[in-house]
Image (cartoon, rainbow, N blue to C red):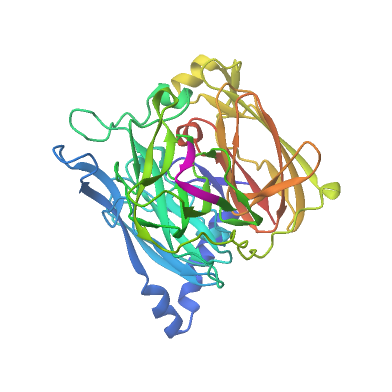
Amino acid sequence: MKSYPDHKGNRISRRDLLQRGASAGALSLLPAGLRAATEARVPLTARNASFQLAPSGYAATGIWGYDGGAPGPEIRVAQGGRVSRRLVNELPQGTSVHWHGIRIDNAMDGVAGLTQQSVAPGDTFDYDFVVPDAGTYWYHSHDRSWEQVARGLHGALIVEEAEVPDVDREEVLILDDWLLNPETAQIDDSFDHPMAMSHAGRIGNYVTTNARFDFSRPVRRHERLRLRLINASNARIFTLQLNGLTGWTVALDAMPLPAPVPVEQGLILGPAQRVDLIVDITAGEGETAYLLRRGGDNRPVSQAAFPVSGSASRARRAPPAPLPPNPRMSAPDLAAARRLRLVMAGGAMGRMDSALLGGERIGFRQLAASGRFWAFNEMAEMTQEPLGDLSLGEPVRLQIVNDTVFPHAMHLHGMHFRQVRADGAASPMRDTLLVAAGETREIAFIADNPGDWLFHCHMLSHAASGMMTWVRVT
């Protein structure tokens, strides 16, 4: 099929161009009332801003933020409701917004060069979609995301269940790290540094919760909270534990578990992953409960502090009930599934000696000089052909082989999947899977959402330097 380059050099097919043009032109055919409602979307402005990110005494940090904030404004909607936002680009480069984890129409997925063209400086783009699933999601830039997300372009998107869980309140906690100049508190602009690209990714030196290094919320003894944790970092894997809190995991990547699982060990949250916890405050009055992270030398340090004052009740409640399930959570029929395979190679200390780039096989040294350090199935760039050309409703088994010495957080757009365990059973649904160095994992999903869907490493520097592919569902 003949294809055409977009403004970034990515190639898109003539059919896709016609489909996008038809979608845009369809707005003119709407009745006047509906067209006015479509045009009156709430603006979401990506722009430069100054934000007091470092402690007082340091200069404000120059960031790129949605509506100038860090994080961006929380978007909250009821399950089955509509999100309508007009992206206004006041940045010096093109941008787009990806609504991470939401099973929405492909045209709204926000991947520049695949599902839409990049929104040029000074331009706008209208996002309008219905959210079918309740849960904890987030939105972030998906054009030069390894730079734009690191500069602050992300925020929380919360979809509320019709049946509210029995909690006193909830806290949305966006975990992030920033790479700052320790003298000036400004963001280090070495986004394309080969070390980050070829090693573990861009790891920050300043860790925050909701853009605060000293995040704290007062609580009462025996109070019950819902904690919605979002890992918005470019590459950091958070290893977390509870102290002074008794908790249960109730959802992973927005999808409810069949039953709450007690948090008895640590929690591992890879880039882009989310976890919903229900926690009881068990620390005594005058003490402080903590969400801790493993810091340097494996020392536990505060990620979020909850100083205890007063009491919500004399005794703790019974364990929580499960969250109501989302639609389309049935496990795929593995016996009838199409089998696909993805081999990840490259990176520092890897064994990849060559890969395909621009239709030519070249050596690793030349790949590195082109800013390409990784490959999927020996392809060091986004492929012209999909990893899988799938029929709507088709079950799929995808084997992922990590033939590198680094972990990778693999994210599938538009659909959720289940990991297939060694005994053949399916794990809970997720949209992002952390695959450790040298591991082989298998995921299974139903190709139930039509469109072209990105599948990539969410260590964003890795995606930028070769770890991107896609599947087509028709």
Residue 399 can be seen in this image: yes
Q: x and y percent of residue 39 in the render?
A: 38, 73
Q: Name which residue lies at 48% across and 39% down.
A: 240
Q: x and y percent of residue 196 in the render?
A: 42, 26
Quarter of the picture holding the C terminus:
bottom right
Q: Name which residue lies at 49% across and 64% down.
A: 167
Q: Nearer the viewer, residue 271 or 9?
A: 271
User: Is 246 a magenta residue?
Assistant: yes
Q: Is residue 122 above or below residue 205?
A: below
Q: Name which residue lies at 42% across and 48% down.
A: 283
Q: Is residue 155 above or below residue 373?
A: below
User: Is 439 a magenta residue?
Assistant: no
Residue 116 can be seen in this image: no
Q: Nearer the viewer, residue 249 or 11?
A: 249
Q: Nearer the viewer, residue 47 or 299?
A: 299
Q: x and y percent of residue 85 in the render?
A: 39, 65
Q: Quadrant of residue 195?
A: top left
Q: Give the residues drawn in magenta, as a range.
A: 239-247
Q: Quadrant of residue 411?
A: top right
Q: Is residue 426 left or right of residue 351?
A: right
Q: Name which residue lies at 69% across and 34% down.
A: 441
Q: Is residue 90 left or right of residue 315?
A: left
Q: x and y percent of residue 376 in the render?
A: 62, 31
Q: Is residue 407 left or right of residue 389?
A: left
Q: Quadrant of residue 255?
A: bottom right
Main SS, magenta region, reads strand
Q: Is residue 109 above or below residue 305?
A: below
Q: In the orientation shown, which residue stands out farthest toward the front?
A: 314
